[in-house]
Image (cartoon, rainbow, N blue to C red):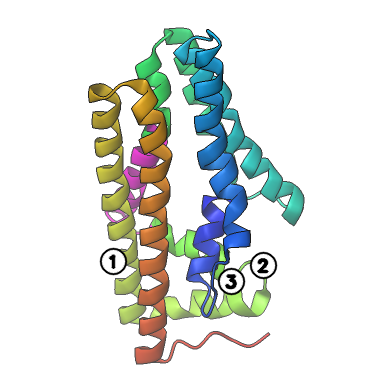
Amino acid sequence: MTHSDLLAARTKPGAEISLRQLVPTLVLDVALPILVFFVLTSHGVSKLLALVAGGAFPALNVGRTWVGSRKIQPLGVIVITFLAIGTAASLISGSVFVALVKDFILTGTFGLLCLGSLLGPGRPLMFYLLRQFIAGDDPGRLQWWEGLWQHPRFRAAQSLVTAVWGLAYVVEAIIGTALAWSLPPAQVVILSPILALGVLTALAAWTRSYLLTLRAQHGFAVPAG
């Protein structure tokens, strides 16, 4: 279960997350990067190379979901692209700091994209991401989700969700960058994935609760099937 899997499960009405579903993300996105960093540095590998090596596991987690679903998700492509760019920038610059903050650059960029989407005439970014997670490729659900846009309360809710996610991720990026600047790399390696997973879990849980409340109050029932 990647971060996008967690969001999908939390936003689908009635969905619950079991420990078994969460284990792959905890192992690949949290435990293994930390373990690899400390094992490699204890054997004389530079902090920079240890950070780069540990960063491969979140990418493998995205690939794992692609293989399991037999479908490449756009969000996963974005994550892989930013990881590759961040890794290349870290190696070219030779900077441990860049390697530590590369994930937070992705986080902050996503937050800014969310906030920026509220300024244009189009629909907010989270409308499209939630559509993928909630409706998937089901024609009936897609038609239902698109039809909800005619309701002013639904449009306002999508703007609110997008604003909350955008602000939360910008704040997370600022906090993470400050941690990378002020703390030793070994501490940042531990704190960064915990911070990221904690913020995502809180946002996904709030979004699911908010959407369920919205559905109950305004009758935006999910079609059967």
- 10 Å neighbourhood of mark 2: few (<14), some, or many (≥20)? few
SS under mark 2: loop
What residue sits right under mark 2 in the picture?
Answer: 137
Which x, y percent locates residue 29? 54, 41
- Is 115 inside the magenta-drawn segment? yes
Residue numbers of the magenta segment:
105-124
Query: Residue 218 appears in which quarter of the rendering?
Result: bottom left
Q: Is residue 8 above or below residue 172?
A: below
Q: Is residue 75 visible?
A: no
Q: Residue at x 63, y 42 (%)?
A: 61
Amino acid beneath label 3: Ala
Q: Which mark is residue 135?
A: 3
Amino acid beneath label 1: Leu
Amino acid beneath label 2: Asp
- 10 Å neighbourhood of mark 3: few (<14), some, or many (≥20)? many
Query: Residue 163 appears in which quarter of the rendering?
Result: bottom left
